[in-house]
Image: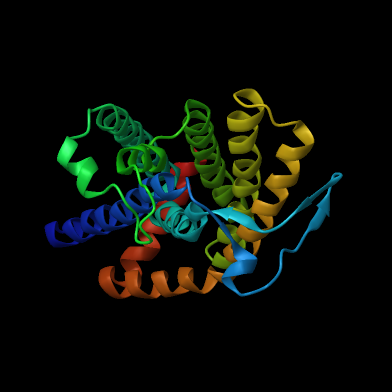
Amino acid sequence: MAATPSLEKKRTNLFLVLSGIFLANALLAELIGVKIFSAEALFGMPGAQIGLMGEKFDFNLTAGVIIWPVVFVTTDIINEYFGKKGVQKISILTVILILYAFLVITIVTGLPPAAFWLELNNQDAAGNPFDIDYAFNSIYRQGLGIIIGSLVAFLISQFLDATVFHWLRSFTGSGKIWLRATGSTLVSQLIDSVVVLFVAFYIFGNWPLSLVMSVAVINYIYKFFIAIALTPLLYLAHYLIDGYLGHRTTEAMIEAAAKESEE
């Protein structure tokens, strides 16, 4: 039976909201990712100094990982209701908009600063000399290798997540949301953790392969536990969407998305 105009509008609104959450968090994660923070210091603990492949590492993570799990969860929700094609569409659009953002940043950071702006902001809070233009450019401008590495890893992991999600669904059916959602995320983020560092710092940088793999393991440990911890959010999202669209409609959407992804 064909969907009524009001129901079709609700479906469209759902996709727009999910896509907006996905896109906003992916873009923000790219922009704030230049800051590296200490997870141990956050909780007042000393560095972990975990030994991996002849190196010792603390849990020093990019600030982008704070909101990146939101992208994981949203990917699985879009996958569930709109299928692999829905994930691919929003992923490609996100990459295009991230490239646009970096293009704008490149242009803006190249603009000559106004003299009064430099003069008004020539000291920090402690009275030390401060170059606000240098700070602005350092924060927003990222190296070509990091940009390429993050975008390549993003696309590969998103497409892989969508594929693994529906592969697991062929075994679980409509039940066990936690298994296909968490399973697809754990696989895709393993690849993401390795690819972004390999491209950015091995191909374009000067890191040895052992260092790339060691840091990738540290990042993946964090993503592993976060993916499991956020599983209840998937059930909450299903509950809210069922209430918004109606159970029969959501079941039909899930089945249609599964069939489309198998084609």
168 vs 156: above or below: below
* Residue at image point 63% right, 55% down: 60
Q: Is residue 22 left or right of residue 84?
A: left
- Tell me if residue 176 can be seen: no
Image coordinates of residue 212 in percent, x first then y, are 71, 38
Image coordinates of residue 107 in percent, x first then y, are 26, 27
Q: Quick one: which residue is furthest to the right in this view?
A: 54
- Tell me if residue 219 can be seen: yes
Front residue (pair 174, 121):
121
Q: Is residue 239 left or right of residue 258?
A: left
Front residue (pair 45, 80):
45
Number of marks present in the image shown: 0
Image coordinates of residue 9 in percent, x first then y, are 16, 57
Q: Quick one: which residue is furthest to the top in this view?
A: 203
Image coordinates of residue 127 in percent, x first then y, are 35, 57
Front residue (pair 211, 16):
211
Q: Quadrant of the N terminus?
A: bottom left
* Residue at image point 62% right, 37% down: 197
